[in-house]
Amino acid sequence: MPKVLIIDDDESITSLLITLLKLEGYQAFASRDWAELPGICIDEKPDLVLMDCNLSDRNGLDILAEIRSNPVLVDLPIIMTSGIDLSDESTLKGADGFLLKPYSPDLLLEIIKNKISGGGE
């Protein structure tokens, strides 16, 4: 069962995403320990990370850069999300995709499926 790590400071969105992904057959979990995310990714070995760009006390793009700086995590698919179009910034920091909020559950599931299976967006 593919594992998806969700990084978002909105607990209701996180809860909805976990529910949606579990209904679709994914093992979904969240972490709010943003300072330790590279280590969490190494320990938990998610198949994909879905991360908000704008977290309450950290910049998701900075966390993305930290994850990408670890050679063990360079191939981990990471999809960034935001209510502001930060697709270019996300790509520059090493994201594998970007979703502008609000996005449809169908689009999210399609992108996750494609990224986990090694396909394109």
Image (cartoon, rainbow, N blue to C red):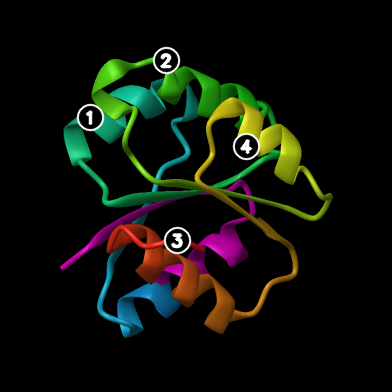
Going 30% across and 28% down the picture, which residue do you hit?
Answer: 73
Which element carries disc 2, helix, strand or loop?
loop
- Please give left or right for residue 24 compared with residue 85 in the image: left
User: Which sits earlier in the primary sequence, circle 1 or circle 3?
Assistant: 1
User: Which sits earlier in the primary sequence, circle 2 or circle 3?
Assistant: 2
Q: Amino acid at mark 3?
A: Gly
User: Which sits earlier in the primary sequence, circle 1 or circle 4?
Assistant: 1
* Residue placed under numbered mark 4 in the picture: 91
Q: Position of residue 94 (x, y in %)?
A: 53, 31
Mark 1 vs mark 4, CA separation in Å: 22 Å
Which element carries disc 3, helix, strand or loop?
loop
Q: Amino acid at mark 4?
A: Thr
State the extent of the magenta-drawn residues as a range.
1-18
Q: Position of residue 27 (x, y in %)?
A: 25, 65
Q: Are marks 4 and 3 in contact (CB under 8 Å)?
A: no
User: Among all residues in the image, which is located at the extreme right?
Assistant: 84
Q: Which of the labelled discs sits on residue 120, or is there none?
A: 3
Magenta-colored stretch includes residue 117: no
Which element carries disc 4, helix, strand or loop?
helix
Mark 2 vs mark 1, CA separation in Å: 13 Å
Q: Amino acid at mark 1?
A: Ile
Q: Quadrant of residue 60?
A: top right
- Please give left or right for residue 58 compared with residue 28 in the image: right
* Residue placed under numbered mark 2 in the picture: 69
* Residue placed under numbered mark 1 in the picture: 42
Q: Are marks 2 and 4 in contact (CB under 8 Å)?
A: no
User: Which sits earlier in the primary sequence, circle 4 or circle 3?
Assistant: 4
Magenta-colored stretch includes residue 11: yes
